[in-house]
Amino acid sequence: MSLGRSLRQCAAAVGIGAETLGPLDANPVPADWRHVTKVDPETAKLLPVAYPLYLGHTDAVSVGGSTAVTADNTEETFRLLARAPVPAVHEPSEARHVTEETRELAAFLALPEVLNGETEALVGTLGEGVAYLHDEMVPALLREKLPGPVYRAVGGPLVDFATSWLLAEAVFEAYIVQNPDSAAARRSGVDESDVLSPATARERAMVADRHLDSEIVYVEYSGTYGGDEAADVLRAVSASVNGARVWYGGGIDAREKTAEMLDAGADTVVVGDCFHDVADEEVELCARAVEALGATPGADEIRSWFDAEVDPAETAAARYLRTTPRVDDPEAAAERSLLVALALCFGALPAVVEGSEPSAERTRSLLSVVDPDGADRLEAALSAGGYDGGGDPIDDYCARVATALSDAGADPRRLRHLSLSKLSVSR
């Protein structure tokens, strides 16, 4: 046996021992993430106006989607989420959604590999991604960073090295897609015959964990709650893996569902649709308030209208907040966040209607009545997100809300048609 082969075997043995027997946890995906919010870059999927507040209750954000996703709207989403108080990871559905900017803004790149779909979904898509990195993205970056003569002299080896380095830094998500009616299933070629039993899911998870070195095994019901069936799969999968984290996604819209999936063996639950529902609710709420109060109501009027017209317990905001274990009183947190959104919008509307500069002072005045701690909480959330605008976070954020309303041609009588989340972001 050659010395080189012996050394490789020793190194492998040390790694296996550390992973299976010792306390060392080499997985870069944090073990204490219990709740991840999925944000779809699709232009039609909005972020709530008060998204920094909502995301303060989750552990991380995963950015990715199956339809109408582009490199441009992915970059825009990451720029917005740079103000969020939690890390954002990138889960691209296509290789070309990965850009230099998304790599810089993402905590890490999570590459999906489907364990029960067509071969194309496991090997083909990944191969296409590796080829894109090696043939296009990495060479373009190196040509931009290096002088021409240097690139021509050493570009080839550097491309090989950088491609391998990017892949070594990436996290691999091994998907078990269990809802054949979902977009994820159609994309990966999963039909009814591919839905896995707990025993088969266990076998696939063991391959992902031990052979593919996948950092995440993701049991995905994609918009549908898996219930008892998913719990059985999770119990089988979680008992079979050593190093991988076990994630569950699909239909989480209540605290009981979160608890059920975590109790069944999921390390993390992923919540998506009900977060985007909050944004739609904000648009509707602002439209109703403008119709009732006009464009320039006082803070007491806003607060009185809200108390009379809105039951926080029945809101999409409360449904989202109920999914996260961090929130002790989801209804109260929903009320506070929705009032902050109203204050931000009503603070910006006069400037939009009159064509003047937005007044952060007016917004702060509204916040002080509708939610006395709202400005402090929003500023703390923005600061936790590494705010680097160079000025006051609230002033900057209010200006961006006003710019978004103005860019959309906001008519306070037609606010329900407005995409409030498309905040102007300076590059």
Image (cartoon, rainbow, N blue to C red):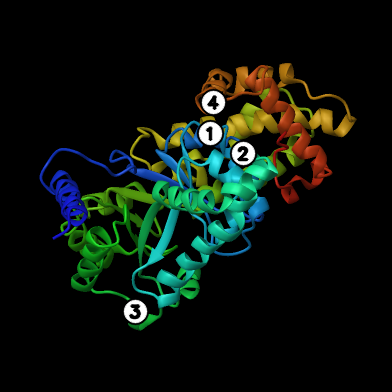
User: Residue 417's spot in the image, x, y percent?
Assistant: 74, 51
Q: Is residue 316 left or right of residue 423?
A: left
Identified by mark 4, the residue type is: Gly
Q: Residues within 10 Å of mark 4 (few under 14, many from 20)?
A: few
User: Residue 261's spot in the image, x, y percent?
Assistant: 27, 54
Q: Find disc 1 in the rendering and name its residue.
A: 84
Which comes before the other along the chain, label 4 or label 1?
1
Q: Residues within 10 Å of mark 3 (few under 14, many from 20)?
A: some
Q: Residue at x 45, y 32 (%)?
A: 332
Q: Quadrant of the N terminus?
A: bottom left
Q: Find disc 3 in the rendering and name its residue.
A: 194
Most extreme residue toward the bottom is: 193
Question: Nearer the viewer's eye, disc 4 or disc 1?
Answer: 4
Mark pair 3, 4: CA separation: 44 Å
Which comes before the other along the chain, label 3 or label 4?
3
User: Residue 318's spot in the image, x, y percent?
Assistant: 46, 42
Identified by mark 1, the residue type is: Ala
Does the CB distance between marks 1 and 2 fall below 8 Å?
yes
Identified by mark 2, the residue type is: Leu
Q: Nearer the viewer, residue 370 or 207?
A: 207
Q: Residue at x 33, y 42 (%)?
A: 28
Q: Nearer the viewer, residue 410 or 391?
A: 391
Helix, strand or loop at label 3? It is: helix
Q: Is residue 99 visible?
A: yes
Which comes before the other along the chain, label 2 or label 4?
2
Q: In terms of image quadrants, where is residue 293?
A: top right
